[in-house]
Structures are given as C-alpha cells and as structure tokens.
Image: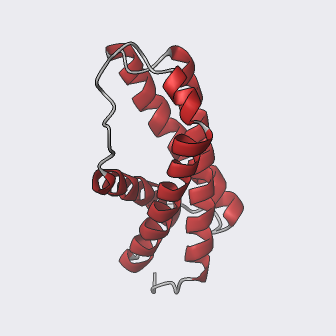
Amino acid sequence: MDLQRFVTGTVAGGVTLFVLGYLIFDVAFAGFYAANAGPAIGVVRDGQLLWAVALGTLAYGALIAYVIVTSRAPLTAGAGVVIGATVAFLVWFTVDFILYGISNLATLTRTVVDPLLEAVRGGVAGAVIAAVLRGAPVAAR
C-alpha cells in the first residue's frame, strides 16, 4: 500500500465526512435525531468537543480510504461510492444495533435510519477519495 496515497485519501475523506456530518446530522436531520432520542438523559454534550469529532471522523475517512486503496476495483467515483457506502453502512449498522441492544440512547426508528444516512455520507466520501486518488501519483507497485 502506498502510504502517501493512503494519507491523501484519509484527509480528503475525513474533511468530506466532517462537513457532510455537520450538514446531515446537525442541520438537515437535527430535528429527527432529537425526536428519536431514547429515554437516556444527560448523554448529549451542551457543546461538542470538535477535536474529538474531527479525530473520529479522520479515522472513519482512513477506514474508507484503506478499503479503496487496497481494493482491486477500478479507481472511479462510482466504485468509490459503492465502497464508501458499503463500509459506512456496515460500520454504523453494527454500532447502532449494538448500542440499541445495550442502551437507551436511540429509538428503533433512529437505529434503522442512521446507517442509511451514513451510507449516503460514506458514499459521497468514497467518491471524493477515489477522485482525489485518481489524480494522485501512484508509487511503483
């Protein structure tokens, strides 16, 4: 694996995921998430720790970038969408349903919808990563 391409994809994916996360979850669907919170109280911070959100989002971008960089799929935006959406859906389906099973953080409706919205976010990030990497120089394999 080419480390420079991986880092480039990670940064491009992380920035894309961070921006889309704000637009999707804090703007477009904020009301839905508030209305479908579980009965647990005191779990939402009054002010988000943006450094922690950014660090987690960067790791999320790294996961999608890793799969794209190591994949044998053609390096196209379409392939990036499929890979990003698949990775995002599987990760968040896993996390959301485990959290639903062990906590009172969300309703079942939110648990089902969240991985679908994450698939959109991951798909867009995958397309951006593939597009950026398509233009990046390839190290000798």
Q: Is residue 50 left or right of residue 110?
A: left
> In terms of image quadrants, where is residue 78?
bottom right
Residue at image x 57%, y 30%? 31
The reply to whether residue 1 is visible in this rendering is no
Q: Is residue 27 left or right of residue 54?
A: right
Q: How is the structure coloured here? A: secondary structure
Instruction: From the top left corner, tell me how far across and down residue 58 is, in percent.
Output: 38, 59
> In terms of image quadrants, where is residue 44?
top left
Looking at this view, name the residue that lies furthest to the front: 46
Instruction: From the top left corner, tell me how far across and down residue 11 is, in percent.
Output: 43, 69
Q: Is residue 113 left or right of residue 17?
A: right
Locate the N terminus and report the quarter of the image it occupies: bottom left
Of residues 98 and 44, the one drawn nearer to the viewer in this rendering? 44
Instruction: From the top left corner, tell me how far across and down residue 88 is, in percent.
Output: 52, 44
How many marks on residues? 0
The reply to whether residue 43 is visible in this rendering is yes
Instruction: From the top left corner, tell me how far across and down residue 139 is, in percent.
Output: 45, 85
Query: Height in image: 116 above or below 134?
Result: above
> In terms of image quadrants, where is residue 132?
bottom right
Residue at image x 65%, y 66%? 74
Residue at image x 62%, y 52%? 123
